[in-house]
Amino acid sequence: MDREALADFLVRRRAQLKPSDVGLSTGARRRTAGLRREEVAQLAAMSTDYYARLEQQRGPQPSVQMLASLARALRLTPDERDYLHRVSGHSAPDRTVFTDYVHPGMLRVLDRLEDTPAFVVSVLDEVLVQNEPARALLGDASGFEGLERSGIYRWFTAPDEERGRYPRPDHEHRSRVLVASLRAAYGALGEQSRAGDIVRELITRSPEFAALWEVHEVQRRFEDHKVLIHPEIGAIEVDCQALFTEDESQALVVLTAAPGSDAASKLELLRVLGTQRV
């Protein structure tokens, strides 16, 4: 780990970004030309003290997951992301299978979607970043670790928590869609990937998954229309649009409702209240 190079890189990248680049307001009394340390920490879901120690060359070696968060927060290009890993003492991730990095262009689109739920998801149904309306509607996905980061994994291992967002009549269909999507990822990433880890674990833990896996359905798609259930607002009918990266390893998913509809009113209520209780 090259602490000096890491610290200098973080300071310079932070100074080069404007608040508007990451979806933040400038403010009338702002004195800092670039982002503040606390803003980078907030965007990366880490403590300000931890980030400050990295810039001061006295922090611990960041984990690969922490570096992925920093790359997203600082809107790093793939080359910059690789450099960040190397000066932090890690190998640069394989660009063909590494799914935690979100391209700055995708993040710029997400930053401009303030009034409707939107999030970036990997081929393993791992939510990599989400806006406030998405957190309010679907819950905060930033706290999951390991295999539990995958919504597919949680669907079969924690059904009481995960399936409550969907009407019961839709559960069987969604199970099939998720398994078919995982089968497609498994074929692309290989047996020794995170997809393979999820498959091996679910086969032993979920008879439902094991039975569906044997069907060999292969398809990755997002429903054009779905019903989601918010625990306090109730059922919300939304349309689903997905924008894929060039290699189709990630998708920006946007949930909308017809203007003037009951669902649009409910989404507006979520936007106003954010993650506060209704």
Image (tube, rainbow, N blue to C red):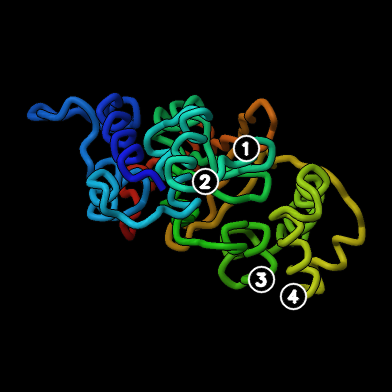
Please identify, in this view, whether the residue under mark 1 or under mark 3 is nearer the observer. 1
Disc 3: which residue: 157
Q: Amino acid at mark 1?
A: Gln
Would you place residue 246 above or below residue 255 in this image? Answer: above
Q: How many angstroms separate mark 1 from mark 4 (CA)?
A: 27 Å
Q: How many angstroms separate mark 1 from mark 3 (CA)?
A: 23 Å
Question: Which dot marks residue 250?
Answer: 1
Q: Residues within 10 Å of mark 3 (few under 14, many from 20)?
A: some
Q: Position of residue 129 (x, y in %)?
A: 47, 44
Q: Position of residue 174 (x, y in %)?
A: 73, 55
Q: How many angstroms separate mark 4 from mark 3 (CA)?
A: 7 Å
Q: How many angstroms separate mark 3 from mark 2 (CA)?
A: 20 Å
Question: Which dot marks residue 205?
Answer: 4
Please indicate, yes or no, whether residue 224 appears anywhere in the rendered image: yes
Disc 2: which residue: 128
Q: Residue at x 57, y 37 (%)?
A: 253
Circle nearer the N terminus (2, 1): 2
